Image (cartoon, rainbow, N blue to C red):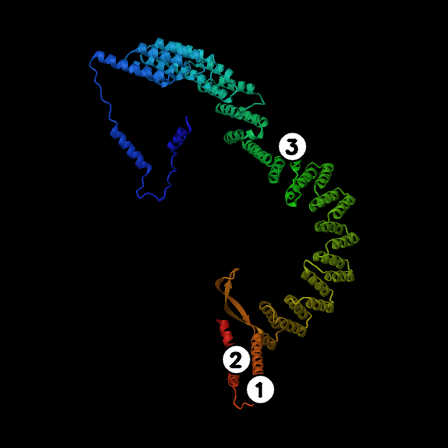
Amino acid sequence: MSDDEGETAMKALRLPKKAARVKNKAAAPVQITAEQLLREAKERELELIAPPPKAKITDPEELAEFQRKKRKDFEDGIRKNRFQLANWIKYGKWEESIGELQRARSVFERALDVDHRSITIWLQYAEMEMRQKQINHARNIFDRCVTILPRTIQFWLKYTYMEELIGNIPGARQVFERWMDWEPQEQAWNTYINFELRYKEIDRARTIYQRYLHVHGVDPKNWIKYARFEERHGFYGNARAAFERAMEYFGEDNIDEHLLVSFALFEERQKEHERARVIYKYGIDRLPQDRQKEIYKYYTQHEKKFGDRRGIEDVILGKRKAQYEDQIQENGFNFDAWFDYLRLLESEGADRETIEDTYERAISNVPPSNEKRHWRRYIYLWIYYALYEELTCHDNEKTRMIYKACLDVIPHKQFTFSKIWIHYAQFEIRQKDLKMARKILGVAIGKCPKSKLFRSYIDLELQLREFDRCRELYKKFLEYEPENSQTWIKFAELETLLGDVDRARAIFDIAIQQPALDMPELLWKSFIDFEISAEEHEKARDLYETLLNRTNHIKASVFLAEFELSIPQEERARKTFERANQALENGEKEERLMLLEAWLEAEKKIGDEAAIKRVEALMPRKVKKRRQMQTEDGVDAGWEEYFDYIFPQDQASRGSMKLLEAAARWRAQQAQREQVVAEAAGSGDAEQPAEEEEANDRENKVREGDSDTDMSSSSTSSSDDDED
């Protein structure tokens, strides 16, 4: 090819153009759905496809021609795909339909040459022979297929059904025997047994059951079926023997709960309640906990129907034990389940070995974390264990070992439990070993001091009348926890009981000087009560004054006034109330009201009418007011009503303050006026400036509003506003 021809060919070759872009992507005005498309397609199909014409054959030659064409179509289909078994089956059935039995057999035989393991072809072939009542041919076909495919259950079922249908019972039995030689599945054995039962052959059915159990005896359900078969036909001894053989077959290691329940129910139906009870107990003793639910269920029902009260209780207790075992196996840290389980064992009087073993299993579940909240329930297992050994078993040495082991388990650097140390010490006291008890509590205080340990040790020494030891313990206690007001009070009370008043007063003096106390008001009250009980009124008054210098609390003033009234010192009490009232003028209104109510009550006790009226004049008025509420975001949330107290002293001070403010404004205006006049005189202007006239007008207005009448009216209006 020359260069010119190549260029001409390149020019003649045209590449496809780029597809034009769709400019308008909007939806079409007329939409169509998938349902419409399918409907239109169906309508067009019905319109286009005409029904096939009906051919009427009246001539044998025409019939032969039709059959030839039909066979040709079948042969063509088979030739195209000889492995399409549906074509062979249709071909054979068509030959059968026209009465060509030999041709039909030929077709099926050819199909078997293609696939001799096809179950469908064998069944269709045999059914064709059965429809044509060709029994021997059908037998031959079934013999061939069960020889080739002996594990196919359909062939055997069809074969036996055919023999039974034509009344050839020995032949059907012979087929079944051939089938059983292959040790088929359970369904085959059950079919054979039902076949014999239909003809009342009980002995033959029993023999088949026994052979069946030799093959499929690993399933307990088969033994149960055999036993029920014997029971149903009245052979109760054989049924019991079947259950016993099953128990021997499975042994103790592989015993099944359903087999035991069925055995027990059989004995129950035979009125052998003791035998049934023994079977239930046998299963409970040998089966694991997770497989005892079914047995407990039927055992409980049996005892409720045929047992006595003791038997019912035993069953219920056993069932509860199984439930607790399930719970603790599911979660070993479920200490509540352990408590209930141990309480159940102790209440029913279980043997010591069982209870101790359960306690050991329980305490072995040590909480994994070093957080005290996870140990609070666990620690009681040790306490109950120790108490059980001490009080029930009377084994003091083992009790001591339990307490020591418990103290070794607790992480004392993170936390401790005072109750363990205290129980251990009390145990040693019960053993009359006081030295050991003191040593235990001393070690506890030295290793992990706690308030409860100190208090228990002090109570022990108080009971023993060891007061010097108590003093030393109180000193250690206060060094450990100096802010504990109760400890200071108890220490002072101890010295008071011992008659050492000066020492008790010194303890109180040191206590009130502590910088931080958890309950200082209780300490001060105890100190004051101590001085009052000692009839040291001056010292008590000094304490009250010291307390009032530290705090201006209303209760301190009220208590001081009540103390003065109890001496009695009415004038001192009034002065105390007056001083407190003056101190609370700018305080909370509720506290002022409480003080005035206490003052009024005190005056009523004294009985001075003038003083009562004077205090009543100080009592406030209770008025209802409204105020606007706001949320945290500053949004208005409406109005609320509340009660307020208006004191006469506050109204008088408010009026005097208004008068002073008016006077100050007048003086400022006067000074401003003088300054303006001086400036005008210096400039030589004879006319009064406009600013001066305006100042005079304002002055006149202020002075007109500054009068007693205006003050009272303003206070009245303000009170009216308050009442609104």
Q: Which mark is in front, 1 or 2?
A: 1
Question: Circles 1 and 2: CB distance less than 8 Å?
Answer: no
Residue 136 in view (yes/no): yes
Look at label 2 and name its amino acid. Answer: Ser
Q: Position of residue 376 (x, y in %)?
A: 65, 44
Q: Which mark is in front, 1 or 3?
A: 1
Q: CA distance from mark 3 to mark 2?
A: 94 Å
Q: Quadrant of residue 344?
A: top right
Q: CA distance from mark 1 to mark 3?
A: 116 Å
Left or right, 644 with respect to 194, comes to right
Q: Quadrant of residue 668?
A: bottom right
Q: Which residue is mark 3?
A: 354
Q: CA distance from mark 1 to mark 2?
A: 39 Å
Say which residue appears at 25% left-offset and 15% top-offset: 66
Look at label 3 and name its amino acid. Answer: Thr
Question: Circles 1 and 3: CB distance less than 8 Å?
Answer: no
Q: Which residue is mark 1?
A: 679
Q: Is residue 691 above or below residue 12?
A: below
Query: 334 or 271, which lies in front?
Result: 334
First-in-chain label (1 vs 3): 3
First-in-chain label (3 vs 2): 3
User: Residue 712, which numbered label?
Assistant: 2
First-in-chain label (1 vs 2): 1
Q: Position of residue 8 (x, y in %)?
A: 38, 31
Quick one: quadrant of the N terminus? Answer: top left
Helix, strand or loop for disc 1: helix
Look at label 1 and name its amino acid. Answer: Glu
